[in-house]
Image: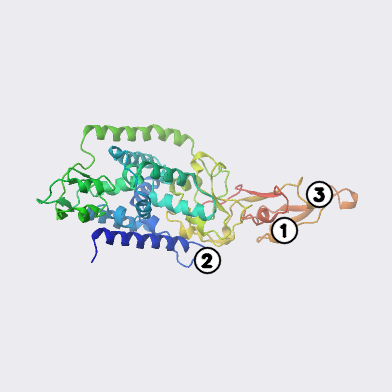
Amino acid sequence: MGSLSTWRRMSQILFLVLFVILFYYTHYPLDFVHTNLFVRTSPLLLIINSLSTRTILIGLIPAVFLLLSTVVLGRFFCGWICPVGTVSDLLPKTKKRLSSFYRFKYYFLVFSVVLAVFGFQILVVSDPLVIFTRSLTFITQKTVPVMLILIVILVLALGERFWCRIVCPLGALLGAASRFKPIGIRAGESCTECGLCGRVCPMNAIQDCRVKNTECTLCMLCVDRCPRGALAFTVGRTQGEVGFESRRTFLKAGVAAGAALALSPLLTGRRVTSAGSTVIRPPGALKEEDFLSVCVRCGECMRVCPSQGLRPVLFEGSLSDFYTPHLVPRIGECQLCMLCWQVCPTGALVEVDPAEMKLGTATVNRNTCLEWRNEPCLVCQEVCPYQAVDVIESGGRGRSDGGRRGPTVNRSLCAGCGACERHCPTEPTSISVSPEGEKRY
């Protein structure tokens, strides 16, 4: 039958393969619309998004089932399913450090929840499923995300499962949910307190042969390695420290909440409205303030974009825009595939009729445009799918008497798809799209 830890390893590999397959199928044409399944199973995303938007998304129902299962079984997701945990287990084993700081992830969770109450979510740096999905997306776009580099450095430098043990607020949420689970691992009377179980535990969840419910990920290494078979599943709450008993712990959690409270007015003062946005959002984007509250920066829309024109905002916008998707027409225009809203797990992008889409408006720079400089071109008119580029004359009746002739944009017809900017032969481009006149939902 094999050991329990062997079955766990098989489960990890199976779910990692499933994650990679779903990620691979997130491309044009989209044959399977539920490629965002893993992201939608995150209870952290469910709670943070619900608090920041004051609504509960039906698409996040899988997260409810995971949370309820955790109440009974414990943090099985971390040890048996989570792709981040699987990759962490595949890394070379290093000496575990900072083990006494395991409560930090609970403070990070409190900080994130309090910010969400005020309409701000920081899942971009907190949810492991979001970070992992986005990192793979950026790698496939041949851009290495800074966050991925930092996480790899931390994991390699600070020990196995460092993210899971110290940082992960999703693990903290699942740990809090599993605090009173009815089924757990407990040492029997045959235990000699040799300490081997504590040494092999990757989560430092065993101290003095007692298992902490909140930290145990059910990896089963302790059960398999115990020389006397003293560890086994039992019904009833396991003994030991579970994370929230001391006054000092409550005080530190209060400090985390206070930091979030102090930061929230500063963030409120810097909220960006749709009118003040400087980046071009994908089709069906919510109003900017709502979009920033709902978008988790997972990168699914960027992955499915057939032109690869959707890119993460880095330094093009404000700090609140960081890692959100925006259209870069010079890289790729919007091809009206309307798949981005289908893979969005949170509803930051909603269904929209292509005929009603308006991402922005194009503008011609007459000083650099070839046609306006009496050099034949009109590529922008040829590629425009909306017939929004007209040719006009100015400064005279014809070229012979000093007049000039060139393209101009019919603003009422232009949808801001960026095809003109993408194919403009001049460098820098002589026709560019801005979010002016965009339609939000």
- Which mark is in front, 2 or 1? 2
Question: What kind of residue is marked 2?
Answer: Pro
In three-dimensional space, the C-alpha distance between marks 2 and 1, rounded to whole angstroms, equals: 27 Å
**Residue 62 rendering spot, x and y as whole percentages:** 33, 58
According to the image, label 2 marks what residue?
A: 29
Query: If you read the primary sequence from the N terminus, does the residue marked by circle 2 or circle 3 appear first?
Result: 2
- Residue 44 visible, this angle: yes
According to the image, label 1 marks what residue?
A: 381
Question: What kind of residue is marked 1?
Answer: Gln
Query: If you read the primary sequence from the N terminus, does the residue marked by circle 2 or circle 1 appear first?
Result: 2
According to the image, label 3 marks what residue?
A: 373
- Which mark is in front, 2 or 3? 2
Is the residue marked by circle 3 packed among few (<14), some (14-19), or many (20+) residues within 10 Å? few
Which residue is found at the position 47% from the left and 34% from the top? 269
Which residue is found at the position 66% from the left and 60% from the top? 386
Is the residue marked by circle 2 packed among few (<14), some (14-19), or many (20+) residues within 10 Å? few
Question: What kind of residue is marked 3?
Answer: Arg
Colour mapping: rainbow
Is the residue marked by circle 1 packed among few (<14), some (14-19), or many (20+) residues within 10 Å? some
Q: Quadrant of the N terminus?
A: bottom left
**Residue 336 rendering spot, x and y as whole percentages:** 57, 61
In three-dimensional space, the C-alpha distance between marks 1 and 3, rounded to whole angstroms, equals: 16 Å
In three-dimensional space, the C-alpha distance between marks 2 and 3, rounded to whole angstroms, equals: 41 Å
Q: Nearer the viewer, residue 192 or 429?
A: 192
Query: If you read the primary sequence from the N terminus, does the residue marked by circle 1 or circle 3 appear first?
Result: 3
Q: Is residue 84 left or right of residue 311?
A: left
Assign a secondary structure to mark 2.
loop
**Residue 152 rendering spot, x and y as whole percentages:** 43, 46
Could you tell me how many numbered marks the image carries? 3
Looking at the image, the residue that sits furthest to the right is 400
Is there CB contact under 8 Å for labels 2 and 3? no
